[in-house]
Amino acid sequence: MMPPSPLLQVEGLSCIRDDRELFCELAFQLGAGQVLLLEGKNGSGKTSLLRILCGFREPDAGHIRWCGNPISDSQYYADMAYVGHLDGIKKELTVLENLNLALALGQHGQYAIPEALTRVQLAGYQQVLVQALSAGQKRRMSLARLLVTKNRLWILDEPFTSLDKQGIKLTETLMTEHCSRGGLIVLTSHHDLNLTDVDVQRIHLS
Amino acid sequence: MSLTHAFFAILRRDLILAVRRRSEIANPLLFFILVITLFPLGIGARPQLLQAIAPGIIWVSALLAAMLSLDSLFRSDFDDGSLEQILLSPHPVSILILGKIVAHWLVTGLPLLLIAPLLAVFLGMPQPAIGVLLLSLLLGTPVLSLIGAIGVALTVGLRRGGMILSLLVLPLYVPVLIFAGNAVEMASNGLPVTAQINILIAILLLSLVLAPWPTAAALKMSMN
Amino acid sequence: MKFIPDPIGRFCHRMASPPHFYALSGKLLPWLTGIFLILLACGLYGGLYLAPPDYQQGDSYRIIYIHVPSAWMSLFIYIVMAITGAIGLIWRIKLAEIVAISSASVGASFTFIALVTGSLWGKPMWGTWWVWDARLTSELILLFLYLGVIGLYNAIDDKRTASKAVAILALVGVVNIPIIHYSVEWWNTLHQGPTVTKMDKPSIHVSMLIPLLLMAIAFKFYYVIAMLQRARLELLQRERTAAWVKKLVSEPSNSSS
């Protein structure tokens, strides 16, 4: 099988935080259908790397390219989606209002909102205020956000926290499906990743 | 257009949130009324004196009320990660942020306008000046929100941002205070105020065009 | 960087490299200090001895030799801060960031000196320490702008982020300064009528003007000296993990000044 042509290219990336070099000269390439799993202890720079990939933090050295262009390009932001430690969900709004806002900020994707909610087992929760949801349900709602908007690259920071076994299984299924559609995923996780038929690269940060 | 759609989606969301939280609207308004009530108590209720300094009192109080309300502009979005999602949108961030600022003004600036005539009567301001007062508030308070947004975007990531925010923002409020306060004072004395109003319009347009850029840049910086 | 020709770009890049800047500024500092002292001596001698007393103000006007150059510097440094801040923001040049923040406290000091000397001058002139004169008021607001910049820089722990914040704030400030200045002038003429005295009269005798200009140039040199010293310190602090700093520290013979 031909290796997929790289979409996300990272070269010579360095990050220094509080006098400590978290990583340096980091390089990787990610093509369609591939997953990159970042491993390492707490404080090893996993989240910092993800935030650099999001463009929130500037790398101390190095380049990140998406389809050959620097990521400051707005095309990158049309193609990526990020789920971080913070859900980015307003608890005073209903599930539907939250997802509608996500749609307004991006573009329509694979699923319509009701379908996506069915996929993440939140069907019928449209009009429920988010503050009434449990932590796991909020996590699943973040997944629904990934499904309703158009994106190729998922950047996920610890997607399995506060999910039960079933929720983890569901997340993995959705990730596998995303890759089979030619999507890319960069994630951090303490949980062991269990994806079938997906090319998973691993980077260990120490 | 999808950008206009995004703009109004943000605007609508913030208005819904404000209605569901309520205190966000009430607090600056109560503060505004309270400060103005304190002045006659502090300096004595001599009608002549109060009337003379009424424009200044009302405008300084409006300035402080606007500053007090600034923290709510990005705070909750910063804390729950919504701001990250807004910054990751492919749309121009400055326009989306402008949506938030407009919503913030509708919630915290506009109510000041509604209560101001009552307070003007408290302080014995002559009838014709009240119209000019409202006009000056209508033109001036959006500027306070726009300039304040820059300051709050710079400090939203800080734990103790409150004190430094006033240091950043208040000096930049000086022109609005001068022209708006002066317009009301002139109107109280029955003099024309076209020049001041024109300058306020110019300041409003200028800050409307320019302020969202540094705000967006500062928010990106605060995400670090 | 495309609109800058390559050789110039390379030259700037070399100049902007921290070790090069550190070495060069170390060599320049004694010369700058020498020139500053000569200019200062000439300016003070001319201003305090050679220049005749003012026919109205007597000798008390001589404070302008400190006051006026300080007031000029206060504005000049703010503009320098905004420009270098913008350069740091756009081209990510670390050195420009450092120059911007190192200028802030020097600028604030000059602003403070201008305010104090203005008020000292006010006592014999107006019989009171403080008058809400347009220039003094503008100067006071400028001091607040400087304090905002310094306060913001100190409040943010990550110094790279802090530099960006400062650059954004300085740019916003520099757009606002003319508006603030104009509004204060307007406010002043409306509330006080024409001011009692202008701080620096446009028509000034040559024997008074030359020392004033000398002092102005001397102050510029002083600014460069003070700014460079702060910048060198800031640079060492930020680059404390870099190889060249470690080398510098381990070889005490190298550390001049």
Image (cartoon, rainbow, N blue to C red):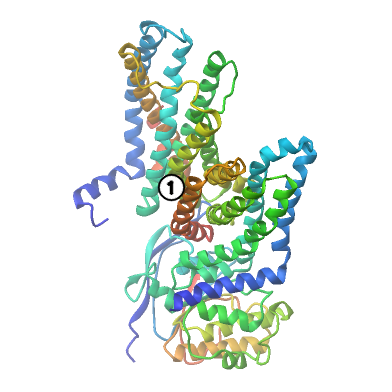
Q: Quick check: can you spot residue C246?
A: no
Most foreground residue, B170 or C205: C205
Query: Residue A13: which quarter of the image?
Result: bottom left
Query: Residue B189: which quarter of the image?
Result: top right
Name the residue rendered at 24%, 57% in the picture. C2
Name the residue rendered at 44%, 26% in the picture. C70
Name the subunit of mark 1.
C
Query: Residue B72: which quarter of the image?
Result: bottom right
Q: Position of residue C107 (x, y in %)?
A: 46, 33
Q: Is residue B155 left or right of residue C194?
A: right
- Can you say whether A44 is above or below C221 in the image? below
> Regarding mark 1 in the picture, which secondary structure is present there?
helix
Most foreground residue, C65 or C15: C65
Q: Position of residue C96 (x, y in %)?
A: 38, 44
Q: Amino acid at mark 1?
A: Leu
Name the residue rendered at 47%, 66% in the picture. B95
Disc 1 designates what residue?
A: C171
